Image: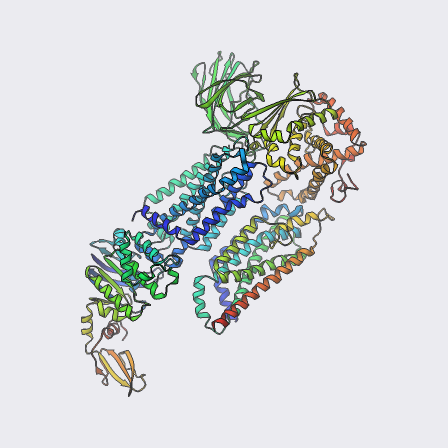
Amino acid sequence: MDITMNHITMIYPSGKKALQDVSVHAKSPGFIGVLGPNGAGKTTLMKLLIAGLLPTKGEILLDGKPLLSQEKKLKAQLGYLPQSFGLYEELTVWQFLDYMAALKGVKGKAAIEEVLMRTNMTERKKARIRSLSGGQRQRVGIAQALLGDPKLMILDEPTVGLDPEERVKFRNIFSEMAQNKIILLSTHIVEDVQAVCSRVLVIYDGRILYDGSPSELIQETAGHVGIYLSADGQTVFDGCQMVSKVNVSDGIQCRVVAQELPECAKTAEPTLEDAYLYCIHRKGGRQ
Amino acid sequence: MSLISLYRVELRRMFLSRRIWVGALCGILTPLLGVIGNETLPSVSSRYIANPVLTATAVSAMLWAVLIILEASRLHRSGVYLLTDAASSPRALSAARMAAAMTVTAAVSILCAIVYLPYTAVKMEYLFDPVFYAANYLIFMLLTGWISVLFADTFYQITRRVELSVILYALLAYFNFSGYAQNDYFMRWLYPYVIVYSDGFQSWWFLRIGFYTRLMWLCIALASWMFSLLCVRKYEKNAAVSLIRGMRRVYLPVLTVCFAVLGAGLWKYQPFIDHETDSEVNNRMIDTPTTNASAIRYFLTAEPVTGRLSGRAEYDLKEPYTGEDKLYLNPGYRVSRMSYGGKEIAFRTVDDDNAGVRSTYFTIPEKKEGTLVIEFGGLPQLRKTHAPYIIAAFIDWESIQLGMRSAAPMLNYACRDGAEVEITIPGSLTPYLNDLPMTEYVECENGMKTWKCRTQEDAIYNFVAGAYETDTFTASDTNIHFVYGKAYEQAVRQYDINQAVKDVFAYCSRHYGALGLTQDQTMRLQQVTAMLMGGHAREGYLEWFETVLSPITLADADKGASATEVFIHEMIHQWWGGYGLVCSEEGSNLWSEEGITVYATYRLVKEKYGELYAKQYYVDNWRKTVEMQERNFYNRHPEYLEHLPEKYQTQLSMENESTNWYDRMPLMILKAEKLVGGEENMDKIMRKMYADRGDYAQIGFTYADFLDYCGLSESDLELTPKDYMTGEEDAGV
Amino acid sequence: MRKLFYYELRRVLFRWMFLAMLAVNGMYAWYVLTTDLIRGAAYTAPFSIWSCCAYLGKTMPAASITVLLILCGYYSKKQKQVEILTSAAPMTGAQHLLIRSGVLAVCFILVSAVIMAVAVFFYSRFFQFYDYAGYILPGLLLILPCFVVLLGAGHLLAGVHQGLCYILIGICFAAALYAPDSAWDLFGSGYFAAYPLTLAPGIGGEPAYQMQTEWAVARGMYLVAGILLLGLKVRGTKRKLTMAE
């Protein structure tokens, strides 16, 4: 599978520019993490890829042909988990997945049993959805996205509501699945991207600031991450973006990213979080 | 995923929904609403079929509409649409959901028919017809349910707001019950119009028109729903943009237009009711010169399956009129061919429906002896102004009613020898042509019979056929042929109706004089279907209303013999009416034979059931009705009448006329009775009036004549508040 | 408090939906006047107090449905999600409820004003009638209990489940189609069409308006019942708060 977005601009009727001249190419296999702050355009990008929106400008191609003319083909191979969604409360977990399987044209109980097992919901398959906790509902959402082994998976904040152990588990599931499909994972949790994504897109204010491997992004940040001690943690140097503050025995240890580190700061080994913040700070015009 | 697969998926999901099951259960209970509290209905079929089915139709349709709006909105309220839209086309899913909803409503309608069948069969006993019963549920409840869910989904798909959709649907539902739609078969989309079901003579006419109107509304609903399908939101666009994008699927707008055109066409070209333009015209005369025919022949075939009449009329003419001539025919019939002397002649039909006929113009080319042949056929149409109440022309398996303008063309032709008539009808029916029984017939194929006779008249004024029984007996030296539907035989025996007939003849002969009839002193009393809402009378012949013999009416102790009293009233018209004393006065809306007939009925009832009963059901009713007439604001202040819409002015005028005839005049005659010295003296006066009836046959017996006979003046009989006010009865009449 | 009332009122009045409902009420009122009340209730003059009250009784279901629809909106899912935030504020649920009831009262007054304005226009145009002094008391007694009872019942039912309020709306709709002639009928159109027929006509040929004791008592009891229902709802709101604490 091959997806190409060429010079996509999306302007909502209210006038808001959600995406500006975005071009992305993805080919299977591939696991792409999409990072960006709230309102950056991540969800808009996701919706465009599932033909849920029409771009104002530009084109989206699926295997070389316009996406909108292949909606049926797309939906037959799509697993989609939106950021917020609803379920049929009166159905049981099994019944809901059965319904979604039927909608997707996925036949057989085996497919449902498999996704239940993968999402650790086998024991709760006969429970009514209204009796599930938030995390369990999220797992049902992931399960329906996994149905039918789709070639393209669009996951918008899939691990919200899951405990840390489950987050790790799902990361591994997604990582396994990425061997023969395209997965786009939008998240705020940088560790999710770091652990499993082979490629990361950083979006800010409707533009793609970075498109490449996480390691390269981290390399670019080398020498731009520093740590210094502050008595009250309130000291902010010009041109610096605060990453974290940690209380230590002799004060507050501040971790910052900057084009030019303050003199008192000691250089630190950059993490992906540092790299992401530095990218936005430098290229997003926050400095 | 194909549409059929989506439909199966949605149907399965609906059957898992508790809301749908609750709705289904409520739907099955809705006929009960029609079973409870329907004591006023005059026929068994109305009580146990029409009322439950029609009530269930309206209530369940509204229930399903609300459910479908809630089901459709749930997709969006719960956010499930985010998942389903990614898995399938929203439009396809919407269509699948509608198909599933229609399946569920159909299932509930069929289930209703099954659940209530034993109860209905037991209650209706020998009158129960399972095919007719099932057809009611399928035509009314099932089809109306479909129409309702289509409209409801239309509103939601366009507005995507639950409360707005409910309001729009409520407005559409209210329209059905509003003044505009109340008496209109075609506008009553939610609560179909059925006046009364006949117990003895079938009522398939209502089902025919019911099916037609359901089909019409189904087309309109489908058109609107298809339009709304175009508005199903995609790409987070609003309704207008989604509509424009939806137009790209060409088949959808094409289907929308097709259904809309079909629905409009069905409405405009409906074959049941004519397009009368002037309701004031009650009679149309052909103003061309009368032509003498040496022979007239009618060949008619009544087709019970389609309800159509086809026929051929032949006129042997020696000296035909060669100017432009015209004939009148029921607006539902079309002249297909006209010929004279074997050669085809041109004709043109004008759409000038009035007084129940339409004109066709033709010209016989030469003044030469020959035979004019007119071939015609079609579905007899009802007159628009009579339509809601009087079903005067129809052809059915168990009943045929063809009034004056519905059996054959009307021309200004006269034939001394009358006309030969051949008519083919279902074999189980007994026909009566121009109020006389037809006796000669030939068996045909398909269970039909061809009846033949020669009439004394040269036109067909009245043709009735039904499954009749005839009782023959004597009452006061009169031979009575009492003709009633086979279905009523039990009731006739049980309630001794023959005795009621004898009582009337005995009373009226004793008080007014023997009835003047044909030479062989024969009187025929013929029962007609309840759908006719009344009957006509002529010398030696009387039609009476079916529901008089309804088991419900006869068994109701509170009503006493009120149904029989209606029967008695009609019979008394033989003395006080067109073939007895002709009462008429030009320009008067007070004086007619009804007043005397009502009074005479009261007197008979008083003798039969006692003074208290007669006072309660007659005198008190007259007083109350006259009091209401006096109270009416517009009667008290006619200067305000101009503010009243014309429809209500006409209604008020008709109400006033009816009150004057049936309540005010009898009260005035009762007052006269007191003033002339009591019942005996009144009887003497009425006996004299009846004896002198021959003097008034041509000129009509007026109110002034009545006053003369009583020796009273107008002011003597003017009613004062004491005469009609409640609580003043001791002081007044 | 005033600011809260202002914003709550603004949320309702400045929606095209409310304006549309006002228009629908106006059109329905005109329809009732020109097709039904023009004939006069119980044969009295179209502008008699009897007819006026019958008219109000016929239009009250529509006005009530308008108010109930707005009330239903207060118990929607979206509203409940907002209440998660507002319930953390110092203002009590009962106060909030009373503010909203005040807003509903304003809406009801506006709708009733439209209905009455249509009638005034109709009577002045067709009958040149302008004297409404004697109409105020019976009119108020007719419309106020309608509002108060439905307000209290609506709040109580919608608090249990929003769908129950829609059932109440359905009952109002049914009342528009079928009106019993009892003095205990909430909307009263059937009562005003039947009761005058039991009275002797006075000077002028129609019975002068007289308030039947039973009817007045019924209105009073409806008013009290409505206040009680509202009180129950207020109490219930307070109790929820206590339990949550």
- Residue C189: x and y in percent read 61, 51
In the picture, measured across the screen, residue A230 lies left or right of residue B580, that is: left
Q: Is residue A146 visible?
A: no
In the picture, measured across the screen, residue B431 lies left or right of residue B478, that is: left
Front residue of A258/B469: it is B469
Residue farthest to the bottom? A250
- Residue B1: x and y in percent read 29, 49
- Residue A191: x and y in percent read 25, 71
The quadrant holding residue A22 is bottom left
Q: Quadrant of the C terminus of chain B?
A: top right
Residue farthest to the right? B677
Q: Residue at x 51, y 58 (%)?
A: C165
Q: Is residue B252 visible?
A: yes
Front residue of B341/B330: it is B330
Q: Is residue B385 above or below residue A139?
A: above
The quadrant holding residue B708 is top right
In the picture, measured across the screen, residue B642 lies left or right of residue C172, that is: right
- Residue B114: x and y in percent read 46, 41
Front residue of B525/B156: it is B525
